Image (spheres, rainbow, N blue to C red):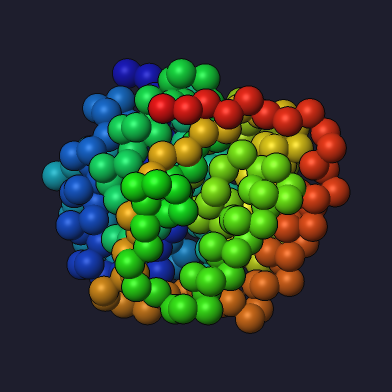
Amino acid sequence: MSVELSIVMPVFNEGEAVVPILRRLAAAVPVSSEILVVYDFDEDTTVAPLRALAAEIPTVRPLRNDLGRGVLNALKAGLAASTGTYVLVTMADGSDEAESVAPMLELARAGADLVAASRYVEGGRQVGGPRLKGLLSRGAGLTLHVFAALPIHDPTSNYKLYRRAFLTSTPIESRAGFEVALELTVKAYAGGYRMAEVPTTWRDRTAGQSNFRLRAWLPEYLRWYRYAFVHRLRRRPAFLRR
């Protein structure tokens, strides 16, 4: 059976906490899917629960990242190993709503090259999380939408679905971590790709520790923030509405 949807999920010492998250995700996606759970090293506490769960849910595929440790390389390894027509990136901390996958996939099937699950549109919200991080994320989304004409409202979130053709034609140049989502978003905008969004609720993790490094990664976010303004005069992408 051909794979319609590949899901890439980087993990780091999530342990048993990842199991209910993967069960909810597997129940929310089409049968013709694969869930690539990417870990950096064999001693990661996520590995044993993953292997046990893979026997229960065949769509779950543990994948070792051999590109070098860190979330950026894990995402690159997962994207490279994925085989689906569409590729969804999601996190292992339970912050992303599995219920958003179906409407995201619907918009991709309708022609969108990038679909964002947005906290900052009507019907979306953010629950918990560091206040400064939330303010910076919301501010970046608002200013890029208003002043750079970016057609979506939540460019920094990694909870996004991409058409494979877009990923194949778009090299990843990020150098640190989670800013890859902003990079791909502004490159889709600059390249005239079709973009869409659905409302979602993001909830801060209730178990484990976040691997987000705001101070270290902020300069990389600013790099792609500036990129959006530099390229705003290029052909604007079509925006698909639900």
Q: Nearer the viewer, residue 139 or 164?
A: 139
Q: Nearer the viewer, residue 109 or 151?
A: 151
Residue 88 position, x and y percent, is 44, 41
Q: Nearer the viewer, residue 196 or 84?
A: 196
In the image, residue 104 sits, relative to residue 146, either above or below, namely above
Does residue 182 appear to the left or right of 211 in the view shown?
right
Does residue 14 appear to the left or right of 71 in the view shown?
left
Residue 232 seen anywhere in this rendered image of the structure: yes
Q: Quadrant of the C terminus?
A: top left
Quadrant for residue 178, please give it: bottom right
Residue 137 position, x and y percent, is 56, 64
Please report the residue visible at 37 percent of the width from the left and 79 percent of the height from the top.
Answer: 209
Please report the residue visible at 58 percent of the width from the left and 51 percent of the height from the top.
Answer: 155
Residue sticking out furthest to the left: 56
In the image, residue 94 sits, relative to residue 188, either above or below, namely below
Residue 173 seen anywhere in this rendered image of the structure: no
Q: Nearer the viewer, residue 220 or 59?
A: 220
Please report the residue visible at 41 percent of the width from the left and 39 percent of the height from the top.
Answer: 198
Please report the residue visible at 34 percent of the width from the left and 73 percent of the height from the top.
Answer: 128
Q: Quadrant of the N terminus?
A: top left
Does residue 213 appear to the left or right of 26 in the view shown?
right
How many numbered callouts? 0
Residue 174 position, x and y percent, is 70, 57
Quadrant for residue 226, please give it: bottom right
